Image: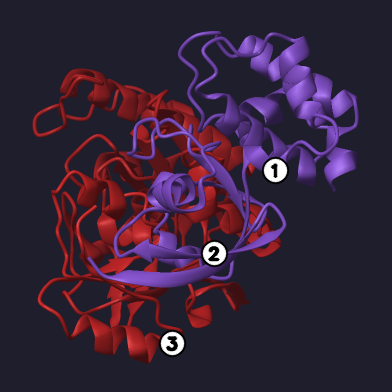
Amino acid sequence: MYDFNYHRPSSLDEAVTLLGQGEDVKVLAGGHTLLPTMKQRLAAPSDVVDLSRIAALKGIEATEGAVRIGAATSHADVAASGEVRNRIPALAALAARIGDPHVRNRGTLGGSIANNDPNADYPAACLALGATIVTTKREIAADDFFVDMFETALDEDEIVTRVDFPVPRRAGYAKFPNPASRYALVGVFVAEGGDGIRAAVTGAGPCVFRVPEMEAALGHDFSPAALEGIKVDAGGLNADIHASADYRAHLVGVMARRAVEAALEGR
Amino acid sequence: MARKPIQFRLNGKDEAVFVEEGQNLLDALRRQVGDTSPKYGCGQGTCGACTVLVDGEPRLSCLMLAESAEGASIETTAGLAGAELHPLQRAFLDGFAAQCGYCTSGMLMSAKALLDRNPSPTREQVVDAISGNICRCTGYEPIIDAILDAAARGAGRRSA
């Protein structure tokens, strides 16, 4: 790889200061997206700020009605957490099925949502659970955070510090993984929480999105059968070598029904 | 290109080398240290041939900056054998679990990480443990069998 300045700050303040210096500064979390991108010369930052040694960004804390997860917490730690498994089992199950062990040991919650890959799993959980994304500057509702493909509401010098997930009454996640990468070809997260039912779809479109028609149907009858006949329009969905837009639209229905089954079984 | 000194443990021994800014750990291990047991496959974090253990966890050394290895404890296939082959190596040999052999060192390290934590894994757990490692010639069955065989021979208990 070409030359750049590597920084590994031990505090968040130091990291924020570093982000304000240098001409093109990138934040490094797990590095499994940024480093391949740099190797392909699709990114060429002058400075890289490694967050891996900032203790304040790691850890899982249960509060009244919510689970707070530090942005630099790995997928493996979320999957193994007793708090997450007890209170939001669907979130633990989601983390356990991201990628492979190498990815789960390195990949972080904050890195995943800040990157906002259209096929990533966590955005669906954030949106369906009505999570709040806490940053070095403010708190952002998940509804406002995910803007478009690889685009979020984050400013250039803003770092995600943690995500607060309200504990739902019940929730479930189902995905059709790409067999090679295990990214979600389509993934649907269904949750029943304080403000009703939310169903969020990842993998199918350019950015995670909700399906109001499914949410309304599940509000009347929280069962897989309630979703029969609800079709998602393939217009605007992704089409690539892995799947056509029509196939993705079909999978949204299948995965949504499976997600409801998972929610009913509490897994 | 600026060079930076780093220190880490490699297979139980102290190493101190100069690495280049932007250099990845795989490259530093192979070129600066001379340990060629981790392999360069895709260089993009897809194939797993470069897997090493960093503080006990399987990691892709091609996607880890060498500078971030400062202070870490790293294990590679070169450190597996003592006076005798590690039970995983023996099981791979006995079970013909390698054809071209290019994926083997990565497979061995992912398998070691599993057995160090879970000496008696199920077949499903073995499959998950090597799901980040791609083999393009023997297929996976002999590899999975060999890891289960090594577990039965006490590989996990030995290294724990």
The chain identifier of the residue carrying mark 1 reads B
Marks 2, 1 in one chain: no
Q: Mark 3 = which residue?
A: A11
Marks 1, 3 in one chain: no
Q: Quadrant of residue A9?
A: bottom left
> Which of the two discs, 3 and 2, labels the residue nearer the N terminus?
3
Q: Mark 2 = which residue?
A: A167
Q: Colour of chain B?
A: purple
Name the residue at 34% across, 38% down: B43
Residue A120: x and y, percent?
A: 34, 45
Q: Mark 1 = which residue?
A: B79
Residue type at mark 3? Ser
Name the residue at 33% across, 59% down: A113
Q: Does A89 sit left or right of A204 as displayed? A: right
Q: Does B4 sit left or right of A61 as displayed? A: left
Element assignment for label 3: loop
Residue type at mark 1? Gly
User: Closer to the camera: disc 3 or disc 2?
Assistant: 3
Residue A163 shows in this picture: no
Tell me: residue B13, above or below residue B152. below
User: Among the chains, which one is red?
Assistant: A
Gap in Å between the C-alphas at discs 3 and 2? Answer: 29 Å
